[in-house]
Amino acid sequence: MSSQQAIGIQRRTPRKGPGRPAAGESLTPREVAEAALQLVVSEGEAALTMRRLGEVLGVKAMALYNHFRDKGAILDAVANLALARLPTPPAKGPWKSRIKAICHGIRSMALEHPNLFRVAMMRPTPPGSALPQIEAALSALADAGLAPAAQAVAYHTLRLYVRAFCLWEIEELRLFRAGDPAELARITAPFPHAAAVGGLIFTPDADRQFAAGLDLILRGLQTSR
């Protein structure tokens, strides 16, 4: 199974005809959003323009405004579709296991579809399809014994950790790994602590680091109850 199939992305064949749907066919908002999602996955957010999306769908760019007021509205729809494809949050089990499942599911999407992750996580208003994940996280935190105010603090801490870690992993870690170990050793030599752990900081085992950081947060939540 391809990574696109893993979250339900299907290739779309452009419509026929000079800038309009074939006879008897009409676009739907869902079709526009699905095509935009596919374009973001394959080419990135910068490639998503009304003109380019119209080309993919085989319609004039102006036809898209019948369904969405602007590119931002299309990106909101793409974010909704992306988050709706996240694994269903577990409703039962130990609260820590449920939180871990949610966080690891988000990271999996980031690694499989980094372009889509950036869009899904950076919209100004949380998409409605994020609510099942939010509700599941808050339910687990409630089961951990946290009061509502503490749940909010814990939720934001977890959310920011996962988002920041994933962005670091997909945007910066590859650059560090492409660096010269000898040069890293040279520049950290005057700093004994940095020299001792520099490799672990700049080129860590990402899987282990993500899990360890998440465990650290969860242990802190447990002791703060």
Image (tube, helix red, strand yellow):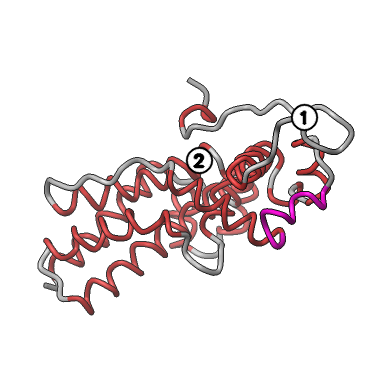
Residue 191, position as x, y percentages in the image: 51, 65
Q: Is residue 212 left or right of residue 176?
A: left
Q: Does residue 62 belong to the magenta stretch?
A: yes
Contact between marks 1 and 2 (CB within 8 A): the answer is: no
Residue nearest the observer in this picture, 115 or 177? 115
Q: Which residues are magenta?
A: 61-70
Q: Residue at x 11, y 72 (%)?
A: 225
Within 10 Å of the Cα at label 2, are there few (<14), some (14-19), or many (20+) other Cα atoms?
A: some
Q: Residue furthest front?
A: 24
In the rendered image, which quarter is residue 216 located in? bottom left
SS of the residue at dot 1? loop
Q: Main secondary structure of the magenta part?
A: helix
SS of the residue at dot 2? helix
Q: Is residue 185 above or below residue 19?
A: below
Residue 68, position as x, y percentages in the image: 67, 57
Within 10 Å of the Cα at label 1, are there few (<14), some (14-19), or many (20+) other Cα atoms?
A: few
Which amino acid does the dot numbered 2 rest on?
Leu
Residue nearest the observer in this picture, 142 or 126? 126
Q: Residue at x 74, y 49 (%)?
A: 48
Q: Does residue 171 belong to the magenta stretch?
A: no
Q: Residue at x 66, y 44 (%)?
A: 32
Marks 1 and 2, the one that precedes in the sequence = 1
Which amino acid does the dot numbered 1 rest on?
Ala
Residue 25, position as x, y percentages in the image: 70, 33
Distance between mark 1 and mark 2 Cα atoms:
40 Å
Q: Residue at x 15, y 65 (%)?
A: 142
Where does label 1 land, which residue? 23
Q: Is residue 199 left or right of residue 67?
A: left
| Viewer can see residue 76 | yes
Where does label 2 land, which residue? 111
Q: Is residue 71 above or below residue 29?
A: below
